Amino acid sequence: MKYKNLALILVFISALQGLESQDSIESNKSIESAESQESMESMESKNSQDSTDSTNSQDSKSASSGLKQAQIEISITDSFMKSQVDDLNRNVYIIDKDFIADKGFRNTTEIFDYVPFVSKNNVGLGSNLDIRGQGQKSNIATQILLNDTNLNMLDSSHGTTPLDSIAVGDIERIEILPGGGAVMYGNGTRGGVVNIITKKKYETFTPSAGVSYTGTPTDKSGLFGSKLNANARVAGKMLDSLYYSLSGAYGYEKGYREGDERNAFNLGGNLTYDINANNSLFIDVSGFHGITDTSPNLLFSIGTTFGSATGFGSDNNAPSKSKRYDKGQGDIKMKQNRADVAIGYEGQFGDNHSFQAKLVHHYLQNRYLHYVAGAWYANRASYMYVPNFSQSGSYFEDMKYGLQLRYDWQHGSGTLIVGFDSIYNIGERFLNLHYDGLMNTVSATMAMDHDIQTPVDANKWTNSLYLIEKYNFTPRLSLTAGARYENANYTGERRYYSNRNTIITSTSKKIKDNISNFALEIAPKYSFESGDLYAKYERGYLSPNPDMLTFGLGNGVYTDSNLKSEKYNTLEFGAKGTIGNHVFLSGAIFYTLTQDEIYSFGSAHSGLSGFGYSNYDLTSRAGIELYSEQYAFNESLRFSESFTYIDARILKGKQLTNLSGSSIDMKNKLIPYVSSLKATIGIEWDINDIVTLWTQNSINGPMRDAAYKRLKAYVLSDLGIDLNLGSFKTTIGVRNVADTAYFVYYNSSSIDPTIGNAYLYAQGRNYFIDFRYSY
């Protein structure tokens, strides 16, 4: 199949060269015209010295600028989303800070409700971003970056990317690369890459501040959800060579569910010192601290007697809209801390050579200060209800220490990029379970007082070398090709302690492995007068996370899983272009074939039932992505539409149901938690220079949960008005206008009843007002 894909690309290039020979005379004129209109600043090179006033100087993995080649870019004032085939022939979509601010977003996660081609996927502990149908594995198959630092957690089973720890006011732009990036970004990019970028360099003194309020009326007596957010920033330039920025934010939330409350603090800053015109040093810091009071997800069925299975599967607490604001069975108090630091050097040598070196550190901790809940507990093939299931003191930590090096050479026919990444990732999990009570048995009443602790200390040291060549055959025709080699060394230990039996059980299992992978990419592009036509072949991989390398056989006994890395091949064709001066169109079709896709089975929350990981033989994801913008009345009336369709399924493979080898055939089964479609519609109307009316709408298609129950499609709609009073701006609006009831989490599976057998409704209709000042 790989050779067929390459043959198709060669035929594609040959055909384009034929087109080139027919219109080479006129092409130079059109190219000069296209180049004179290029104005979009996004996805510029980290080494570009011509635009540091308006972009980040340290966007290390962004495409290099300055290539003399025709390229269509949407850069119309107030456009919804910028789109381009960038200077490395990558399909890129960009959301800028104005779109985010003008829609009144004060929560990073909610931005993506209306972003084309991106979905949200909740594994029970929070939302992850999903591109191109990754489902439950979106937390490890879609890479999320903050200024090019990876935020994905090493713990694959409990990893939730900390999106909401990023202050919305700090975001300069969000770059979305659907379905690719294995050569540039490495492991876990089958779905794509989302890079959240904050602004660093300000030429003049630039203070800004904002405050917003959101209210959520409910039908529950005495409950009115509300959010208050405030943020401020000062930034500027000192001594002609020192740039600074300092930002802070505070958010208070009285949640829409009974008993929910949150306090959150953000702090960020940057110093950039220009040694001279060609060399600079920088330090970038970002931090978050949050305390959240909440309750567990709602259970489908609630038990009544300790240790009894009575009620399990009865749906005595079945979902209904009336339960949308209800408290779950228990109380949770969680602390979250995040810190990111990057220190780097950037240098420009001559007109054609640049180099960047960056040290990065990332720290994230989620700790349960208090967690006592009613929960179902799997005891081999049976279940028991525990009304005081405690996880207090449990925590998850993720730490990264990294070195990133990159060299760019702008030669006469294109660009050569050589890079090296070394990332040492530490993941620590401490699961502290306790329950006690009197359980009635057939013969007697038995006192239960059990502790179970399962610490996991995991390390993954990844070293990668990559090379990318962008070669311009002609001013219109170019080819990008690249390769990456990666070696991952695994160490660590999984331990188990329990006093469930008469004799205390304490066991451990070392984690040790070494896995190498490689990625390949080839992407031709042909530029015509009003657009681009491109194709892409990518061979990528997803190496196992350390916690996947062991089986839990039950009662604290572990063994090696002998898990294989995933290998995938993606073929994509796409085009972008304008029709006249008022219409922009973009489209892509793709097909991804994955060998040895990883899945999990069993219950990791039972000391007796066991759990494990294995590989499907083949899975596939096929789809189409369409996006368009239209402009009328001198661009005062603007429309945008997008449509995504995805078919994600298992082509071949069996899924183990227990550790004894029993399995079920999964051939042609859909991959759970993948919405088959998403469509968005946006309208903006500038009534005058001060007032803008807008609406944004998102149609989210049906999906299957872990038990293959069909979840219905739903529609979200927002309405708002922007008031532009010079330095002061105000946005007033309504989210979820129709008060649509839908789920952010739904798992009807009883295989792991501790995290399954549960659901959580999303927030209903809410109203917001946002005030902003910027100098």
Image (spheres, rainbow, N blue to C red):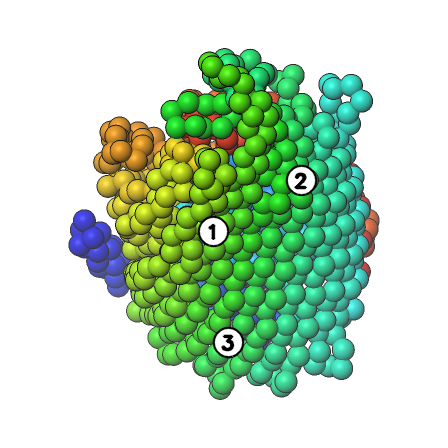
250 w.r.t. 332: above or below: below
Q: What amino acid is found at the position of numbered circle 3 in the picture?
A: Gln
Residue at 58% in and 22% down: 438
Q: What amino acid is found at the position of numbered circle 2 in the picture?
A: His
Where is residue 515, by image quadrant? Answer: bottom left
Residue at 64% in and 68% down: 284
Task: Single out the mark in the foreground, 1 or 3.
Answer: 1
Q: Answer few, some or many: residues within 10 Å of disc 3's Cα (few below 14, many 20 plus, some between 14 and 19).
A: many
Q: Answer few, some or many: residues within 10 Å of disc 1's Cα (few below 14, many 20 plus, some between 14 and 19).
A: many
Q: Residue 38 appears at what percent x and percent y? A: 53, 62
Residue at 60% in and 80% down: 280
Tell me the distance, in whole angstroms, between the alpha carbons under discs 1 and 2: 20 Å
214 w.r.t. 488: above or below: above
91 w.r.t. 303: above or below: below
Tell me: 300 left or right of 524. Answer: right
Along the viewing direction, whichever of 471 and 313 lies nearer the viewer:
313
Tell me: 235 left or right of 57. Answer: right
Where is residue 655, by image quadrant? Answer: top left
Task: Single out the mark in the foreground, 2 or 3.
Answer: 2
492 w.r.t. 586: above or below: below
Q: Residue 499 appears at what percent x and percent y? A: 50, 39
Q: Is residue 387 visible?
A: yes
Disc 1 on helix, strand or loop?
strand
N-terminal of the pair, mark 1 or mark 3, is 3
Disc 3 on helix, strand or loop?
strand
Q: What amino acid is found at the position of numbered circle 1 in the picture?
A: Val
Q: Answer few, some or many: residues within 10 Å of disc 2's Cα (few below 14, many 20 plus, some between 14 and 19).
A: some
Q: Which mark is residue 456?
A: 1
Tell me the distance, in whole angstroms, between the alpha carbons under discs 1 and 3: 35 Å
